[in-house]
Amino acid sequence: MISVSLSKQLRDFPLQVEFELASGQCLALVGPTGCGKTTTLRLLAGLLQPDAGRIVMDGETLVDTAAGLSVPAQKRRVGVMFQDYALFPHLTVLGNVMYGAQARGASRREAEARARQTLHRARLDGLESLYPRQLSGGQQQRVALARALASGARVLLMDEPMSALDPVTRRQVRGEVLEVIHDLNLQTVVVTHDVADALTLGDRIGVMHEGRIVQLGTRHELLAQPRTPFVAEFLGVNLLQGEASPGPDGLSLVRCGSHHFYTVEQETGAVQVTCHPWDVTLSLQQPDDSSLNTLFGRITSIAHLGGRTRVTVENGVAMVAEVTHASEERLGLKIGANVYASFKASALRVYK
Amino acid sequence: MSHDGKHNRAAIVLIILTALFLMVAVGPLLGLFVYAPPHTLLAALAVEEAREALWLTLRGSLLAVGLALVFGLPTAVCLARVNFRGKMLINALVELPIALPPLVMGVALILIWGRKGLLGHYLAEAGYPLSYTWVAVVIAQFVVAAPYFVRIAKTAIEQVPVSLEEASMTLGRSLPATFGLVTLPLAGRGILTAVVTCWARAMSEFGATVIFAGAFPGRTQTAPTAIFTLMQHEIEAAVALALVMLVFSGLAFVLAQVGVGRLGLAGGVA
């Protein structure tokens, strides 16, 4: 259980965050670049000091500015997975993963045993004697996670854990990260600018904007009832439930109610699929490109957000498309009109 | 094909230019061997004055390097890692001696630490004059050579990503332990280069030494000042001494290379 209430003056706005997190829960902080999410993470890790506030973790007060208390980073037992992984280039994989346990007083033998066990669980057996530069991006990421876990951390902080990975590795790693979080019953804070990552990783999701968590809730709450236009716009990702099975041409087929969509990602069973509104195009005629997924439906809402228009098309399932004002006018979009919403198989991302 | 051809031509031109550079810049060293064949080295070492000068140079420069490490490493770390107002200015001041003629440093040293200097006269009155002693030799070498150490060591430390140090701290290591286990090993090659450069510069120090320590044979005469003095009447001895210094510097260079390999020091962080 962590309870956090922190403030710090940043260059353009004050950072002010408050949240509580139960054991085994994952909080995803999501927001645009520069919203203060990474600063929040660094405050939790003790790499930055707040102007005011408190952090209480499992009953231990880590920070209390009123009492002049701040436990230094090395005594917090907060595991951090850095965005660039920050693996020690002069140490082997084993050396990296042993580092934390040794720092916290374990003997060499103990540290090595624990490191080997963690590496085994992270499916990194056989890589012990390699150096970080000899590993793939996905492997480096798993080593960074193993290193944070083997140090005896009671909280795991992840800074943009997926940002350096290609889409396929990304999906695999996301699954592994989820597994670890739930297996170890760790409290985890993930910081990301990617809405889809936040929605799938976080048990609860906090949307950050200019230093504040503007809405904190479950995936369902956020998508169903965005509290501000910013949240609505920022979260505006299409999320559908479906059943995946192998399809033609190496594609997978996802059935969502009476509809089916193709995706380039390989998955089977119950899944969630996401698609960004800007990947969805609208047309009045059936697109002749057969590689496209299409949904023929009725326009149920048209919302203007800055320079773009968000159009919701419904027919059993709902799909939001983001188009320019110019195409809105060209197509003569009106509520109640029927249109084709289409998107590529590569735009549909699948989450188990 | 034609692109490759152009590429080759460019490479040939560059190789020729490099050869020219070597001829003009390094070629003269050959003159030393032609004028004084290697066996005259031993002859030079047989002269007591030369032996004493060499010994003083070696002893003094090693002490100066030691001082540079003790005082220069914290400075390098500070300049690489701590942010404070006026850091640019401090950085410029630390490196200023590199741009100054060593003679100027010598005059400055005399004015401060000389027997009638601002602070030096207290020491002289107490019976411990600094100028024209072997200690003055070390101070002169230190003052001139240490800025090179700081500059190179600072750059080496700057190249270690801060996130690695932060990772070490979150894994439970204190700041000093992190410095020893992460920063130092990763900056090791650069710091070794800094030591060797500093040592080479200290051994070859002439201007500040001549002014602040003088060149009294057997007391404050170093190899470089001895070479200068000997050139005026015993040119063979001067050349032989020069050859010995060349061997010393070469040795330092080779030692540094071997050290980098043997210690398995990580080079850079790429």
Image (spheres, rainbow, N blue to C red):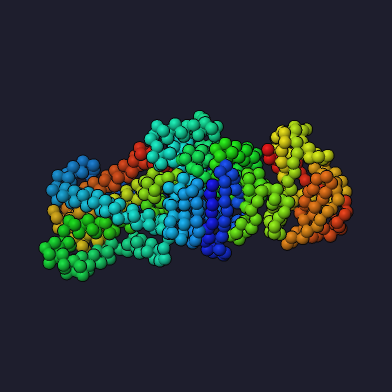
Asked if A9 appears above or below A183 in the picture, the reply is below
Asked if B169 appears above or below B205 in the picture, the reply is above
Q: In this view, does A38 lie to the left or right of A262?
A: left
What residue is rendered at 38% in x and 57% in y? B78
Nearest the viewer among A140 and A205 is: A205
Q: In this view, does B104 lie to the left or right of A103?
A: left
Residue A322: tell me if it is visible: yes
What residue is rendered at 54% in x and 34% in y? A122
How far across and down, in percent of the image, does residue A114 sit?
46, 33
How far across and down, in percent of the image, does residue A292 sit?
80, 43
Asked if A275 appears above or below B98 in the picture, the reply is above
Outermost residue to the front: A59
Q: In this view, does A103 lie to the left or right of A207?
A: left
Residue B214: tell me if it is visible: no
Q: In which quarter of the image is residue B185?
A: top left
How far across and down, in percent of the image, does residue A179 sit?
60, 37
What residue is rendered at 32% in x and 55% in y? B72
Question: Which image quadrant: the C terminus of chain A?
Answer: top right
Nearest the viewer among B31 and A251 is: A251
Q: In which quarter of the image is residue B230?
A: bottom left
How far across and down, in percent of the image, does residue B148 sit?
34, 55
Outermost residue to the top: A126
Count the numbered circles shown: 0
Q: In this view, does B261 lie to the left or right of A82?
A: left
What residue is rendered at 68% in x and 48% in y? A219
Nearest the viewer among B210 and B118 is: B118
Nearest the viewer among A11 and A133 is: A11
